[in-house]
């Protein structure tokens, strides 16, 4: 893969709210997280996300690098979000502008990680005392409060409402979208021989308060298992010191035909 970078140069023109095309110019860095950087633009409603190769696990306790991870995650997230938009799920995606960079709608992130589970794995296996790989009778939705210092503790709808993180209607919308994303991904991945074990989503509010899907959908945020062999094709290879992280990410990239 070739790696693209636009620096501070102009990117393709994008229509603003009034339908007028304007050049989006990357400016100051607003935020840097474990896997991405976010930059302001000359449009207050848009930002540029820049995906990194940095890999972390266990709330940043384990750190490393996966070659070209940022490219895979950027392009895979964009590919899936474009498909989800067609399926009626609003997302932050606007336009991919390089291998690692994408223009997205600026949102205020709802401080929740939404975890959807189809197969028992990871922390759920420990909590319910059942081995990994057991298929659930129906999908489970879990919520965690986004706070690294607290270890992203699990919370429920009562916590969310009482602490004013989201309204009941917003939580209902988030749950509805999450299950729709799950249904869509299960079908998409089945066609390429991959089981969707579980995945994490994040949602944000646009300037007018609309809830939309944000963040990313990638091997960083999902558990992907080969349907035949059970081989892990996601960040668990890094978390569990299995090796072959780069090959796993590239394999998912190829299977989705990106």
Image (tube, rainbow, N blue to C red):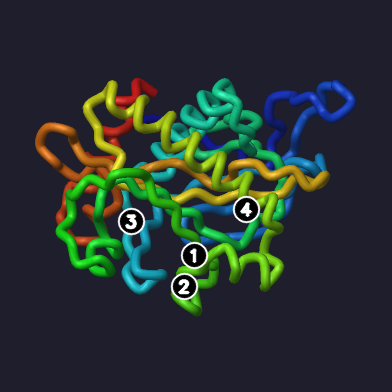
The nearer-to-camera label among 4 and 3 is 4
Q: Place residue 11 in its image quadrant.
A: top right
Q: Name the residue under label 3.
A: 65
CA gap, disc 2 and disc 3: 26 Å
Of 30 and 86, which appears nearest the observer?
Answer: 86
Residue nearest the viewer, comparing 90 with 55: 90
Which residue appears at 29% of the width and 26% of the height? Answer: 254
Q: Assess disc 3: are there few (<14), some (14-19) or many (≥20) residues with their C-alpha within 10 Å of its C-alpha.
A: some
Within-10-Å neighbours for mark 2: few <14, some 14–19, many 20+? some
Marks 2/4: CA–CA distance: 17 Å
Number of marks: 4
Residue 151 rendering spot, x and y as whole percentages: 44, 74
Q: Residue 64 at x, y = what percent?
A: 32, 61
Q: Nearer the viewer, mark 2 or mark 4?
A: 4
Residue 101 image offset from top left, x and y in percent = 56, 39
Of badges 2 and 3, nearer the viewer stands: 2
* Residue drawn at point x = 34 percent, y = 21 percent: 257
Say which quadrant the C terminus sits in.
top left
Res 153 label: 2
- Pointer 1 residue: 144
Q: For numbered disc 2, what is the local secondary structure?
A: loop
- 187 relative to 4 in the view: left or right: left
Among the two numbered marks 1 and 4 on one chain, the one whose residue lies closer to the N terminus: 1
């Amino acid at each position: 893969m070739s790696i693209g970078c636009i620096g501070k140069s102009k990117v393709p023109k994008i229509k603003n709210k009034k339908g007028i095309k304007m050049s989006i110019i990357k400016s100051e860095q607003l935020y840097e997280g474990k896997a991405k950087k976010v930059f302001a633009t000359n449009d207050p409603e848009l930002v540029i996300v820049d995906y990194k190769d940095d890999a972390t696990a266990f709330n940043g306790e384990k750190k490393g690098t996966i070659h070209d991870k940022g490219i895979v995650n950027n392009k895979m997230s964009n590919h899936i979000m474009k498909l989800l938009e067609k399926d009626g799920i609003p997302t932050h995606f606007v336009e991919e502008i390089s291998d690692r960079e994408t223009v997205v709608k600026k949102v205020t992130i709802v401080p929740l990680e939404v975890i959807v589970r189809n197969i028992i794995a990871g922390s759920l296996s420990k909590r319910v005392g059942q081995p990994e790989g057991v298929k659930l009778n129906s999908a489970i939705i879990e919520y965690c409060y986004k706070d690294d210092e607290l270890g992203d503790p699990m919370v429920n709808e009562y916590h969310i409402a009482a602490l004013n993180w989201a309204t009941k209607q917003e939580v209902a919308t988030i749950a509805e979208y999450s299950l729709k994303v799950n249904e869509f991904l299960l079908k998409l991945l089945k066609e390429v021989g991959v089981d969707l074990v579980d995945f994490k989503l994040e949602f944000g509010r646009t300037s007018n308060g609309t809830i939309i899907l944000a963040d990313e959908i990638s091997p960083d945020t999902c558990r992907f298992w080969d349907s035949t062999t059970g081989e892990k094709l996601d960040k668990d290879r890094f978390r569990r010191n299995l090796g072959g992280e780069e090959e796993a990410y590239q394999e998912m990239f190829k299977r989705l035909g990106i």
